[in-house]
Each structure stands twice: as structure tokens, then as C-alpha cells.
Amino acid sequence: MLPEIENLLKLQDADKEIRRLQDEVAELPKRVAAIELKLAGTKAQLEKAQASLKADEAARRKYDANITELRTKISKYRDQSLDVKTNEQYKALLHEIQFAEKEIASNEDKILELMVNADTRDKEVKAAQAELKAETAEIEKEKEQARQRTAEDEKQLTEWRAKRDQLRSGVEESLLRHYERVSKFRGSGISEVRNQKCMACQVMLRPQIYNDVRSGKETVVCDSCQRILYFNPADELVDQKPGVHRPKRHHPKIDAPQAWYYRPEFAEDGEVFLCLTNAHGQASRRVYDVHTGRLLGDILSREGDFRQAFPEDITGSTRLNGSWSEEELDGFGGELPMVILDSLRADLDLARHEAASGSHVKPAVAAPTEHAAS
Ligand SMILES: [Zn+2]
């Protein structure tokens, strides 16, 4: 991996951490505000309970005053009754006295009612006071925690910002500008490539771009999302772990005009891929290194069909899937593109797995069917 890419990945981590800390710092006052809002609700409840208590006390005072006033009236009526001349006058006064006594009883009832209620009101006020006290203590604790957390976050932010500045200086300026521009709009400026796909935008890469990313010789950006691309072989291996999902292998046609083979040993070159092609009455053979995809030696041509022209290469080889035109093969030049190399390797992997599991074994060793078909 390019050191620039490694620096960008570290820079991205720093950017993410800085964003997380900034979000947290911004979030804390909102949390405190939410607690304070709840506290205001409890305060209002207490005030309401206290106001009710006060109103009851005022009402009781009024009823007491009423009673006093009524008693004064009664005693006045009694005094007057001593001086009355007629029976009618006496009856009228007696009626007034009875009416006042009824009024006194009614006021006394109301006072009794208030006394019964007073107990509940008192409890309400005391409960609201206790709740307010507890909440106030809680909010003070939370505020203190928020203050401490903010201070800690600010400290970390300072450290991360210093780290980020240092990492920035390790990235070439135009690349850094590109990274920051894309980060600003897309939230991230760098993306991993897996299975020929940009993992951030999920778009398939063109083979040339994919090769460039895999080779790790220069920085490449995604055509679709503009993120800087990188390739991590370790992650690709994880994806290809056996047993997870192994597609059913497609079997190559016996009479195809082109055939690819894998040979574990080829002269002094070790493992190779062979490409045998029939064209215009001639058979040609190309030999590629399995690991690098490099074309080994010259392209060999012989008269006739490749099955007759190169029998010694076919015997003991594993037939693979793959077919590219003569023009494409010429276009590859001295090196197979990574995509092609990958597809051959993947097919070889499937063929080996198939052979090991005993399903559909088609040994190319004796290659009787191939000779029979030709
Ligand atoms: Zn992309």
C-alpha cells in the first residue's frame, strides 16, 4: 500500500474521531436543557400545590369571618326580640335567627371539608418539594458530569487536531485537497476496493482502474464517487474464505477453439497458466506465470489443432474456464490484467474444491474425452 494511502487512512480515522467529539460536545448542553425543562415542570407543580393550599387557607378565613358575623347578627336579633310589641315582629326575628343559624352550619360544613382536604394538600406540597429537591441534586450532578465530559472532550479534540495536522503534512498537497473536498461533500474521502467494487458507492470499477488500484503504484480515484481508492489484499482474502459461498462451477466446452490450463510445474517456471488457441489452421500457445500474470517466453505456433499440436502440455493439466479473442490477448501484452488473473485463479480454486469433494471430477490427466472430441 502506498504510504500516502496509509496516511490518508490514519487521517480519516482522526477526522472521524474529531467529528464524533465535536458532536458529543454539541450534544451535552442539549441534554442539560432537557433536564432543566423537566425541573421547571416539577417547580410548576409545586407552585400549583402551594397556591391551592393558600387558596384553601383564605377560604377558611372567609368562612370563619362569616360565622363571626352571623353570630353577631343573632345576638343582635335576640336583643331586639326583648323589645318587640307584636307576635308577628317576634316571629320575623325568630325566622332571621333560624336563617343565620343555618348559614353558620353551612359555613362550618365548608370549613370541615377544607380541613379534610388540607391533609391531602399538605401531602401534595411535601411530595412536590421532595421531588424538586431530588431533581435539583440530580441536575447538579448531571451538569457537573457534562462539564467534566466537555472538558475531557475538548482536551481530546486538541490532541486529535494536532495529530490530524501532523498527518496532513504527510500527504501530498493536491491529494490532500482532493481528499478534503470529497470528505466535505460525502462524509469520507477514501474508499476500499473489494471484488472490483468501490465499497463506498458500490459501483464496479473499470478493469484498468481496478488494476491500477491493486498494483498500489499510484493513487486512483473512483470515477463514480471521486473517493481515493485503496486495496487491502487481506480483506479480499477474508471475502473468499472457503465454505462461505462457493458458486457451482461452470464447465468449459471440450471443442472450444481456445482452452486455458493450469500446470503445477512447467519446465523451470513452476506454476503456469497455459492458453492454447486455434486460429487459421494454426495452434498457438501462451504461457503465463500464475502469480504475476507475466507472459513467459515467446508465443509458440504449430501446425493444426492445439490438441494434436501440444498434447504434452494438456496431459496432467487442469482445464480452466476462460476465453478471450486473439486481439484481446495481444492487447494484454506481456502481462495478464489482474481481473483475468483473478478469474483464472478463482476458477482453479473451484476446480480444486470440486476435485477434493469428488463431485463432477473430470480429470484432464488422461484427457480422453478431449482427444475423442477432436
Ligand atoms: Zn466510489
Image (cartoon, grey):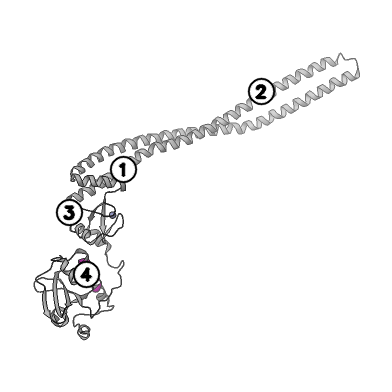
* Secondary element type, mark 1: helix
Residue 34, x across and y down, in percent: 44, 37
Whole-angstrom CA distance, mark 1 to mark 2, is 64 Å
Mark 2–mark 4 Cα distance, whole angstroms, equals 101 Å
Q: Which residue is mark 3?
A: 218
The answer to whether mark 1 is within 8 Å of ligand 1 is no
CA gap between label 3 and label 4 equals 25 Å
Task: Using the image, tell me which numbered label, if any, was put on residue 61.
Answer: 2
Instruction: Decide if residue 150 is on the left or right side of residue 258.
Output: right
Measure how far apart labels 3 and 2 are at the Cα level: 93 Å
Which label's residue is closer to the chain start, 2 or 4?
2
Residue at which label 4 appears: 344
Above or below for 43 versus 304: above
To which residue does mark 1 refer?
19
Label 2 secondary element: helix
Q: Nearer the viewer, residue 159 or 68?
A: 159
Mark 1: amino acid: Arg
Quarter occupied by the C terminus = bottom left
Identify the residue at horizontal 38%, vertical 34% (top origin). Answer: 144
Residue drawn at the location 72% of the way across and 22% of the way down? 66
Quadrant of residue 336 in the image?
bottom left
In the image, residue 309 lies at what x, y percent?
Answer: 13, 81
Q: Earlier in the sequence, mark 1 or mark 2?
A: 1
Mark 2 or mark 4, whichever is nearer to me: 4
